[in-house]
């Protein structure tokens, strides 16, 4: 079945309440946090692919998102970057969760947004949740912050979940329009969840960030199960403190972040501007790590 620019299979299997969890790659997926979260839930509840863009090259430049040759027991195949749609069914909770792993479009972005909104309408989504991660001036030695916003929901609708208000201003993705439009045009309640990761730690897979987002999502979906990301994250971050020994600049930076964090309650945590010295220091660290990888 064709829904705007998407091909959808088995849409008739949707019953009960259907929620949607969206992630955006690569814009708000630092540390692969959203990807890890989707993979964990997909594995736990045996996800099934139900759709994708039927002409992805209309929106993507494949000299920037490169196709990949994949080899397996069945031979070699070409994997073409695309926006992927999958479904999990949680019978105990009487809900379906649709995952839309959006790949940020390079062109015809308004058309892409229109297609996503039409898809959400077709799937009769009741709740839209955008998840992601970003680097921020927060310490690894404190509980990670999750900032976000809601439309159409009251605090009583999210018991046990405390979201900090984001004060971010700056560049964003054109797909940010989707969150506002689904509420205004379709009346779908929305939640945005962004976990803030220490900007001086560049991990390919940040399990602490993934564990934090998982903990919030499980509360929203009223689920309870153990996930390895919790322990993996603790192990990852436990290696950071010993690394501070002998690095006074980094040690002072972390102490500054800790002091600022401790001054304020999570509910009114505000970002502060980095001094030129700190910005210079972070730039040096980034350049050193690039040289090490090369």
Image (tube, rainbow, N blue to C red):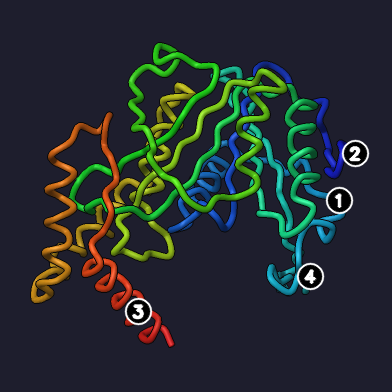
Upstream in sequence: badge 1 or badge 2: 2
Task: Residue 286: name its quadrant.
Answer: bottom left
Residue located at (30% from left, 56% from top)? 198
Q: Secondary structure at mark 4?
A: strand
Q: How many neighbours does mark 3 have within 10 angstroms: few (below 14), some (14-19), or many (20 or more)? A: few
Dot label at residue 289? 3
Q: Could you give the CA–CA distance between mark 4 and mark 2, rounded to whole angstroms?
A: 25 Å
From the viewer's perspective, tell me whether residue 57 is left or right of residue 81: right
Task: Residue 116: name its quadrant.
Answer: top right
Looking at the image, do the residues carrying marks 4 and 3 touch, with CB atoms under 8 Å apart? no
Upstream in sequence: badge 4 or badge 2: 2
Which numbered mark, 4 or 3, is in the foreground of this view? 3
Which part of the image, by quadrant, shows the N terminus?
A: top right
Of residue 8 and residue 244, the one placed in the foreground of this image is 244
Q: Could you give the CA–CA distance between mark 4 and mark 3, rounded to whole angstroms?
A: 34 Å
Q: Could you give the CA–CA distance between mark 4 and mark 1, rounded to whole angstroms?
A: 18 Å
Q: Secondary structure at mark 1?
A: loop
The residue carrying mark 1 is 54
The residue carrying mark 4 is 77
From the viewer's perspective, tell me whether residue 181 is left or right of residue 230: right
Looking at the image, do the residues carrying marks 1 and 2 touch, with CB atoms under 8 Å apart? yes
Q: Secondary structure at mark 3?
A: helix
Upstream in sequence: badge 4 or badge 1: 1
Dot label at residue 2? 2
Which numbered mark, 2 or 3, is in the foreground of this view? 3
Upstream in sequence: badge 4 or badge 3: 4
Q: Residue furthest top?
A: 156
């Amino acid at each position: 079945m064709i829904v705007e620019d998407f091909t959808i299979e088995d849409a008739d299997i949707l019953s009960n309440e259907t929620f949607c969890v969206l992630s955006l790659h690569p814009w708000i997926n630092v540390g692969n946090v959203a990807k890890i979260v989707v993979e964990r839930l997909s594995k736990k509840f045996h996800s099934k692919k139900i759709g994708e863009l039927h002409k992805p090259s209309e929106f993507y430049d494949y000299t920037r998102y490169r196709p990949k040759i994949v080899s397996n027991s069945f031979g070699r195949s070409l994997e073409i970057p695309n926006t992927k749609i999958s479904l999990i069914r949680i019978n105990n909770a009487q809900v379906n969760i649709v995952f839309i792993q959006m790949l940020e479009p390079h062109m015809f972005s308004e058309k892409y947004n229109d297609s996503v909104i039409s898809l959400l309408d077709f799937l009769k989504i009741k709740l839209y949740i955008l998840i992601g991660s970003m680097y921020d001036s927060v310490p690894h030695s404190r509980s990670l912050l999750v900032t976000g916003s809601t439309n159409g929901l009251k605090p009583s609708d999210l018991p046990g979940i405390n979201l900090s208000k984001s004060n971010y201003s700056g560049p964003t993705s054109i797909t940010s329009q989707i969150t506002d439009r689904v509420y205004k045009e379709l009346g779908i309640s929305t939640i945005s969840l962004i976990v803030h990761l220490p900007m001086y730690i560049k991990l390919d897979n940040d399990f602490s960030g993934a564990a934090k987002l998982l903990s919030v999502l499980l509360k929203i979906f009223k689920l309870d199960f153990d996930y390895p990301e919790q322990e993996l994250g603790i192990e990852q971050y436990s290696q950071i403190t010993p690394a501070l020994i002998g690095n006074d600049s980094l040690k002072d930076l972390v102490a500054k972040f800790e002091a600022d964090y401790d001054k304020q309650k999570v509910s009114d945590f505000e970002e502060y501007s980095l001094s030129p010295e700190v910005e210079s220091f972070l730039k040096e660290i980034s350049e050193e790590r690039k040289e090490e990888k090369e």
